Amino acid sequence: MKRYLTSTAIVLAALSAPVLAQDSITVVGWGGAYTESQRQAFYLPFTEATGIAVNSVDYNGGLGQIKAQVDSGNVTWDVVVGEKALAEIGCFDNILEQLDASTLPDAPDGTPAADDFIDGTISDCGIGSVIWSTSIAYDQRAFPDGGPQTINDFFDLEKFPGKRGLRKSADVNLEWALLADGVPVDQVYELLETEEGINRAFAKLDTIKDSVVWWEAGSQPPQLLADREVVMTSAYSSRIFNAINDENQPFTIVWDGQVWDRDVWMIPKGTSKLEAARQFVNFTSETEQQAAITNVSSYGPVRQSAIALIGKHEKTGVDMKDFVPTAHLENAIESDSEFWATYREELFARFNAWLAL
Amino acid sequence: MMSGTIANVRPPAAQLDGAKRRQVLRQYRRSQRRDSLRALALVAPLCVFLAVMFGWPLATMLTRAVSNDDFGAVLHRTSASLAEWDGTGTPSERVYADFAADLRQARDEQTMGQVTSALNFEWTGARSLLMRTVRQLSSEPENGWKEKLIETAPDWGNPDLWILIKRLAQPYTSRHFLAALDLEQAADGSIQGVGPEKAIYVTLFWRTLWVSAAVAGLCLVLGYPLATLLARLPLKTSNLLMMLVLLPFWTSLLVRTTSWMVLLQDNGVINSMLVWLGLVSDGNRLSLIFNVTGTLIAMTHVLLPFMILPLYSVMKSIPPSYVRAALSLGASPVTAFWQVYLPQTIPGVLAGTLMVFVLAVGYYITPALVGGQSGQLISNIIAYHMQQSLNWGLAGALGSLLLVGVLLVYWLFNRLTGGQGLRMG
């Protein structure tokens, strides 16, 4: 009897699986604390509101997997969160669905979404999800007499000896190298368009190359700091916020020179769950949800109306407003998605060659 | 070997007359055919599986490496009119008009992606150039397309760009293979090396080769004594020791690699132990990970079972009486080992070395996790081009070169062993 029941259960499970699959979407994010905050602020409330389950998958950025799925006609990702530059490249290369910004929900006070969304968070194939930033974080234990304060300090091996973590990627690193070499914030991208500027950036990176530990996944920098493998590192600021406030780690965020960018939702072209995917994007765009993600993780909201709803951290009671990237715009770099959409291939090729040798 | 046995059993034809003999032979051949058909049917699923899961993807990758995909098909008018252009000065108005028509069609049919991604790898800023240009296509120009396009973006007045487009419009290309060897084709058609700031692949190929050889060598040095010991110990003890070899072998590769990170990092177990023992000072901890040392250590450990297992199975088949006989006939232990034992283990040594070497050449996760910058191998850059830069043509070319390299090594190996090939005991 027991065996009969078991096999019936298996058959039933097999039969019902496709039915269940109809009511779920696969949302792809960057993993770790970031995905956890999305789960709390976006996924769970979305499932509660619509009955559509969210199946969460992690990736490390890039359009490769989306392209592979679209090209093979087997699209299993329904919504993907990634940098704005990727949405622009993917849109023009025709591997992303066009998104209609006119269906986005209005703010509670009736302001239309188009006016409420922060500049540059709505494009043809990308709808803003959060504002995030790459900044420096250091280990207080390594610098009892005071840690680095600026980007220049990050590149100063004499004053602040020890290994540094950097993301294995051309963006942010090249901007910082020029900034540390004395280039004003507003001239960084202009200079990077010239051969001279690129050489200058790589020359500056050369000065710390032997002391760099390269990371790839966003969850690595807090781990590297906690393991004392590095004394300071570039990191996604909200990951460090989580490490400080949720795990009591003795880290400090240095906001000087932070590179902030917008993460946007993208929908791979040809997903069978297009309607549910659009519904998901619209849901997370609501003011309430936008405030919710800031309150759990310090990611910045993409709409102005959400800023008023930002409160205090549940556990430590710190004011979340102070940890939002957009609260520290002095000497900050706004990542130029157009620049990176244009020069990505060339600069990444050069960066890889520089790195491997 | 099966067919050999059957062929050697000759039918008792001698005692039969002509007709009978032919009939028996026919029956015999029929039954043989049935046997071979049955054998074929047995291996058919495997063959189909190999063709679908191995042959086909491999062929796709190889074609990608030399094909220009649909570039010429999307820009079909342009490529036709460019064929008449001699490559000096800017092309004629007709080329520009055809180009505008092709782009407009590509925009409407949403096939722009195939043009942009190919052009963008070769021409910096091509994507934004095309984005800007496509926006200008809606209205007919007053003074012709040539003037309008060049006005939109000066790049369209650059003959080099049109030479590039003409080249990309050909169905086949050598550019991926050239790029995989740090070469490029200049606008005048000559082949030249890329600048030193972009050259990377040749260095990585050599690094992959020597790292793989070093890993195979280290595995041999570490694995040989262990395999000898395993083959000599009584079964009960050797089984226990064998478990110690197999347990890590069965453990997930990721788990093993990350445990090496715990052991090798600056504040890891090994460094802390050395500092505690006073062998190194606290300030000069050894850099054992995130460099080529880390790659060597972790890969050697991960691949060691692939050396030990073939060695063990060969050694197990060597009767211990041979060495005993040599010793009793007056050979010193060293001579007995060199002249009697070692030559008999050579098939295992070669099989193990080849296997570890070939596996190491394609190794990807371990160097990615523990290799840092100096420990990256060619497979890591192939993965980068597959997943990040989306330059699948270049990834295909790099993969093909790697495959050719491995086949060469295998051929050399076969020559060296006198055609014995792999023997697992």
Image (tube, grey):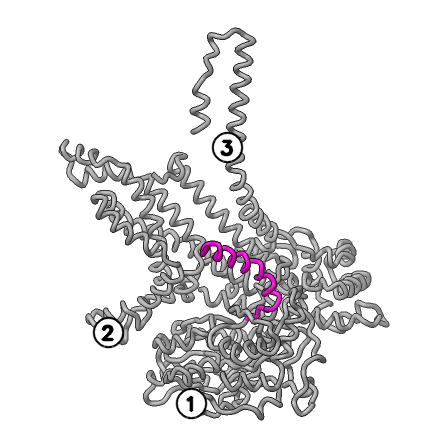
Q: Could you tell me if residue A207 is visible in this image?
A: no
Tell me which label, 2 or 3, sits earlier in the chain.
3
Q: Which residue is mark 3?
A: B39
Q: Nearer the viewer, residue A93 or A345?
A: A93
Chain for numbered disc 3? B
Give the alpha-carbon distance from disc 2 to disc 3, as whole Å: 66 Å
**Amino acid at circle 1:** Thr
| Crowdedness near tag 2: few (<14), some (14–19) or many (≥20) residues, C-alpha within 10 Å | few
- Residue B403 % position (x, y): 50, 48
- Can you say whether A251 is above or below B62 in the image? below
- Can you say whether A235 is above or below A346 in the image? below
Q: Nearer the viewer, residue B237 or A209?
A: B237
User: Do badges 2 and 1 share one subunit?
Assistant: no
Residue at 52% in and 64% down: B198
Quarter of image, res A349:
bottom right
Chain for numbered disc 1? A
- Residue A152 % position (x, y): 44, 84
| Crowdedness near tag 3: few (<14), some (14–19) or many (≥20) residues, C-alpha within 10 Å | few
Chain for numbered disc 2? B
Q: Which residue is mark 1?
A: A316
- Residue B202 % position (x, y): 48, 56
User: Do badges 3 and 1 share one subunit?
Assistant: no
Foreground mark, 2 or 3, reads: 3
**Amino acid at circle 3:** Ala
Q: Could you tell me if residue A163 is visible in this image?
A: yes
Q: Magenta segment range? A: A1-28
**Amino acid at circle 2:** Ser
Callout 2 secondary element: loop
Quarter of image, res B119:
bottom right
Q: Which residue is mark 2?
A: B281
